[in-house]
């Protein structure tokens, strides 16, 4: 059933492109194995979450025949916003295909819920995978720093920021400056 739906979508895309003088098929639909059924479920899921209907969203999520990274990320984000970090972590741990977005969402959840060491531990776990942090990951991680964060932790993240080439990013620099101050190291903040 899934392949026939994908073929129909691809044929429609091709017809639309041909009609308007573009003789090419949208490669993204093919490359990402676009699934119209999962896409419909994701729109419904997003609608439930936007209206804060978490139990309905979870029921729909559980009934989905196929879930993609977007579906799971939406539910993780929902649980984090509602303060249910254990469900969010359970979904994350059971994910097959984690992206930088998935990692950053959970890191941000720990940061927002005053668990900076969990955020740092998750960041270290992320570094052990093939997924590289981006500027949003760094700004999110650093936003959770507080007085319990050590100078060593912030300095290590600072070194990674430099290694990955985000030292000129304004949001990252502001988060780094704030982190040095929160970790009682204004002397290091001065040199940024």
Image (cartoon, rainbow, N blue to C red):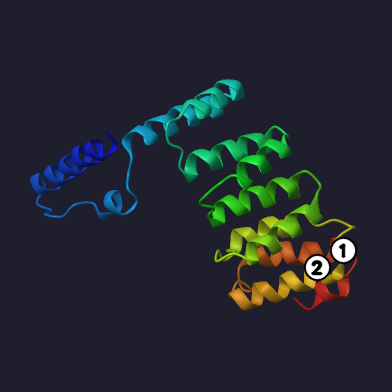
187 in relation to 144, above or below: below
- Residue position for label 2: 153
Labels 2 and 1: the sequence-earlier one: 2
Front tag of 2 and 1 = 2
Left or right of residue 65, residue 163 in this image: right
Q: Residues within 10 Å of mark 2 (few under 14, many from 20)?
A: some
Element type at marker 1?
loop
Whole-percent x, y for residue 144 in the image? 77, 53
Whole-percent x, y for residue 147 in the image? 89, 58
> Is there CB contact under 8 Å for labels 2 and 1?
yes
Left or right of residue 147, residue 85 in this image: left
Viewer-proximal residue among 85 and 156: 85
Residue ID at (11%, 43%): 15
Q: CA distance from mark 2 to mark 1?
A: 9 Å
Residue ID at (66%, 64%): 172
Element type at marker 2?
helix
Q: Residues within 10 Å of mark 1 (few under 14, many from 20)?
A: some
Residue ID at (54%, 38%): 74
Which of the image's four quarters has the C terminus?
bottom right
Whole-percent x, y for residue 48 in the image? 52, 25
- Residue position for label 1: 183
Quarter-of-image position of residue 171 = bottom right
86 in relation to 32, above or below: above
Whole-percent x, y for residue 112 in the image? 74, 46
């Amino acid at each position: 059933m899934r392949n026939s739906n994908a073929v129909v979508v691809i044929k429609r895309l091709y017809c639309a492109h041909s009609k308007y003088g573009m003789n090419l098929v949208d490669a993204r639909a093919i490359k990402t194995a676009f699934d119209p059924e999962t896409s419909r479920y994701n729109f419904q899921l997003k609608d439930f979450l936007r209206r804060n209907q978490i139990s309905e969203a979870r029921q729909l999520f559980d009934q989905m025949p196929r879930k993609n990274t977007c579906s799971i990320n939406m539910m993780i984000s929902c649980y984090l916003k509602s303060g249910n970090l254990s469900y969010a972590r359970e979904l994350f741990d059971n994910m097959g295909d984690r992206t930088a977005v998935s990692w950053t969402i959970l890191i941000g959840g720990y940061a927002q819920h005053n668990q900076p060491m969990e955020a740092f531990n998750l960041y270290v776990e992320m570094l052990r995978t093939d997924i590289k942090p981006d500027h949003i990951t760094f700004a999110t991680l650093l936003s959770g720093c507080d007085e319990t964060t050590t100078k060593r932790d912030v300095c290590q993240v600072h070194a990674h920021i430099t290694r990955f080439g985000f030292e000129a990013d304004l949001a990252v620099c502001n988060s780094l400056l704030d982190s040095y101050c929160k970790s009682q190291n204004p002397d290091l903040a001065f040199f940024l």
